[in-house]
Image: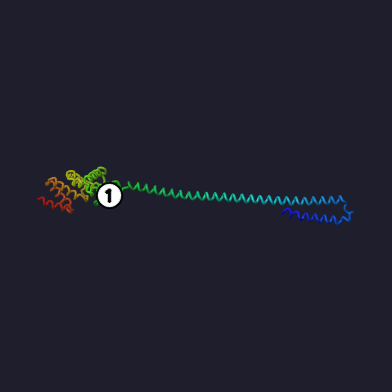
Amino acid sequence: MRSSLIAAPVKSLLTVVLAGLFATTSSAAIFEDDEARRAILELRQRVDSMQASQQRAADDQRQDSEQLRRTLLDLQNQIEILRTEQAKLRGQNEQLVRDVADLQRRQKDIAQGVDERLSKFEPLKVTLDGQEFQADPAEKRDFEAALAVFRAGKFADASVSFASFVRQYPRSGYGPSARFWLGNAQYAQRDYKEAIGNFKQLLSDAPMHARAPEAALSIANCQLELKDNRAARKTLEDLVRVYPQSEAAQAAKERLSRLK
């Protein structure tokens, strides 16, 4: 279609020229036959040259169009590659965010675990029987476990537990209370001599302890069970003298009155 459109003006030109030539054939004197042939050849050369020029222009335009198409395709491919890389980077970024969040959670769990483990070894402030002192978590746990056994009425097991406690923690703030309950567990088993020994140890180690008056009264009770009334009387008299304001002293007075 394009070639026919390009050739149309050339054909028109050729027709006009030929018409002019034939119109002047009556004037044969002006042009000879060879001159007419030369004119026609020149005209054809001009026409061929114009057609060739137009064909080159069409070819160049076609090449430019093809080059533009290839350039557009390359740009489209590059855009797709960039989109793919962007999606990949976005996915990597999201994964990094998840990894950081997981790492932070693990660090928090580790820190919490370390704090919990350290807390098992940090001294605790304890208040027991009117005394305030520092104790290791293990001491507190072992003392409370032994006391729970005593309160359950398992006196033999309680004796073992408290005896183990005073050996394992000889300088513990729980020591006087542990001696007191150990003596009571032994008293419950009628092991009066051992009970007296632990009650006396409490009085020797902590004479001003809140359990000291009860320990002294318990010594007198053990002595009475052993039929040693003389020693019991002395213990009760000392109790009234040393701890006159205690409830144990009031009980000691009543028992002294019955011993007379």
Say which residue appears at 64% left-offset and 51% top-offset.
Answer: 69
Say which residue appears at 29% left-offset and 46% top-offset.
Answer: 138
Say which residue appears at 57% left-offset and 50% top-offset.
Answer: 80
Can you see residue 203? no
Single out the residue that lies furthest toward the left. Answer: 260
Picture quadrant of residue 4: bottom right
Between residue 14 and residue 196, name the one nearer to us.
14
Residue at label 1?
Answer: 133
Q: How packed is label 1: few (under 14 Cα within 10 Å), some, or many (20 or more)?
A: few
Residue 238, image x, y percentages:
15, 49
Quadrant assignment for the N terminus:
bottom right
Single out the residue that lies furthest toward the right. Answer: 29
Q: How is the image coloured?
A: rainbow
Q: Eyeballing the image, is 172 above or below 28?
A: above
Residue 247, image x, y percentages:
18, 53
- Left or right? Give the position of 213 relative to 22: left
Between residue 119 and residue 209, name the one nearer to us.
119
Picture quadrant of residue 197: top left
**Residue type marked 1:** Phe
Residue 260, image x, y percentages:
9, 50
Can you see residue 160? yes
- Left or right? Give the position of 43 relative to 84: right
Residue 47, image x, y percentages:
78, 52
> In this figure, what is the number of numbered marks?
1
Say which residue appears at 17% left-offset and 48% top-offset.
Answer: 218
- Helix, strand or loop for disc 1: strand
- Left or right? Give the position of 230 relative to 93: left
Between residue 46 and residue 127, name the one nearer to us.
46
